Image: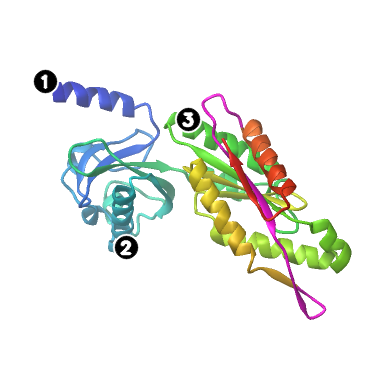
């Protein structure tokens, strides 16, 4: 057995313990390596995929989406993540391999360490996770905005931390607090305050990525979990939120009532970090931003 065969055997042994399908794609979208978990999607024999292009497997629109992720991952030298629906009625290749029902998958692409430009593509069936999210009981949702609450956020944050540690990635948590909400309620009325909270919730929802998790964690506070986001990227995201809020307002007696937000950002500090510790650090940063007069951003690991 030569060195390449030994390396391939070791790679296969490692990948067999994962619940994901793994492909290595060239810059042009050609499959140059393939390994599949037993519990994952019915791709057929791994060797049969090698040499095929994305366009040989997926319909034009989906192949273009995959190719776009390849291009972004290589040009930005970053991990790219998307959730998408695999429907065998649209993906004839998988249907021919025995796929009968549609499923949600999470696709992750990151630049590989090969000599030629290529990406490692991990595809994980997340249908159970999506089903669990749809079945979140009302006790885990906020009545005013319909968002998840802190009770729903914390296990998702813990899962994101575990996944980041497993793959040597990172994640960040952002807390967004409405400045002087109590004063607005007292002077303008609770209806105006509720309008502002709803406008903010809608705006945050429009800004978040597919993989992000948004929750209302207090009367005047929202949280956004940002997977694959380092400290610098978390601060940039917070700045986008703060700037967006500048355009939001609510109507009261024919006039616009505007508001500002303070934002605290914490980033995964290491393997021993926990959801509670990360949340507490974000709260500490938020309090610092508010002590500085509001309409500020504070962040730390």
Based on the picture, tell me whether residue 269 belongs to the magenta stretch.
yes
Image coordinates for residue 126, horizontal then vertical, percent: 47, 43
Question: In the displayed structure, would residue 208 be above or below residue 50?
Answer: below
Looking at this view, name the residue that lies furthest to the front.
292
Q: Residue at x 40, y 33 (%)?
A: 19
Which secondary structure lies at badge 2?
A: helix
Looking at this view, name the residue that lies furthest to the right.
186
Q: Residue at x 44, y 35 (%)?
A: 169
10 Å crowding of disc 2: few (<14), some (14-19), many (20+): few
Question: In the displayed structure, would residue 61 be above or below residue 42?
Answer: below
Q: Which residue is mark 2?
A: 61
Image coordinates for residue 290, horizontal then vertical, percent: 73, 48
Give the magenta range.
251-274
Q: Which residue is mark 1?
A: 2
Is residue 71 toward the left or the right of residue 183 in the image? left
Q: Which residue is mark 3?
A: 165
Q: Residue at x 26, y 52 (%)?
A: 93
For marks 1 and 3, the one nearer the N-term is 1
For marks 3 and 2, the one nearer the N-term is 2
Note whether residue 238 is visible: yes
């Amino acid at each position: 057995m030569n060195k390449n065969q030994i390396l391939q055997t070791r790679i296969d042994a490692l990948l067999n313990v994962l619940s994901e399908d793994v492909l290595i794609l060239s810059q042009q979208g050609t499959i140059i390596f393939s390994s599949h978990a037993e519990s994952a999607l019915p791709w057929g024999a791994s060797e049969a995929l090698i040499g095929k292009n994305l366009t040989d497997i997926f319909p034009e629109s989906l192949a273009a989406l995959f190719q776009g992720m390849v291009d972004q991952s290589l040009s930005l030298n970053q991990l790219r993540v998307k959730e998408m629906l695999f429907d065998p009625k649209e993906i004839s290749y998988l249907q021919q391999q025995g796929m009968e029902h549609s499923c949600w998958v999470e696709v992750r692409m990151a630049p590989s360490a090969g000599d030629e430009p290529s990406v490692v593509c991990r595809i994980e069936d997340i249908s159970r996770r999506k089903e669990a999210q749809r079945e979140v009981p009302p006790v885990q949702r906020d009545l005013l905005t319909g968002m998840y609450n802190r009770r729903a956020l914390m296990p998702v944050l813990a899962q994101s931390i575990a996944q980041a540690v497993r793959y040597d990635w990172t994640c960040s948590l952002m807390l967004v607090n409405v400045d002087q909400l109590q004063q607005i309620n007292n002077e303008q009325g609770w209806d105006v305050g509720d309008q502002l909270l709803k406008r903010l919730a809608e705006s945050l929802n429009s800004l978040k990525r597919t993989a992000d998790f948004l929750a209302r964690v207090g009367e005047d506070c929202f949280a956004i979990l940002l997977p694959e986001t380092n400290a610098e990227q978390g601060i940039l995201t917070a700045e986008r939120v703060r700037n967006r809020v500048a355009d939001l307002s609510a109507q009261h007696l024919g006039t616009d009532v505007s508001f500002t937000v303070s934002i605290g950002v914490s980033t995964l500090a290491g393997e021993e970090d926990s959801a509670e510790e990360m949340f507490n650090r974000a709260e500490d940063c938020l309090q610092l931003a508010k002590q500085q007069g509001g309409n500020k951003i504070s962040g730390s690991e």
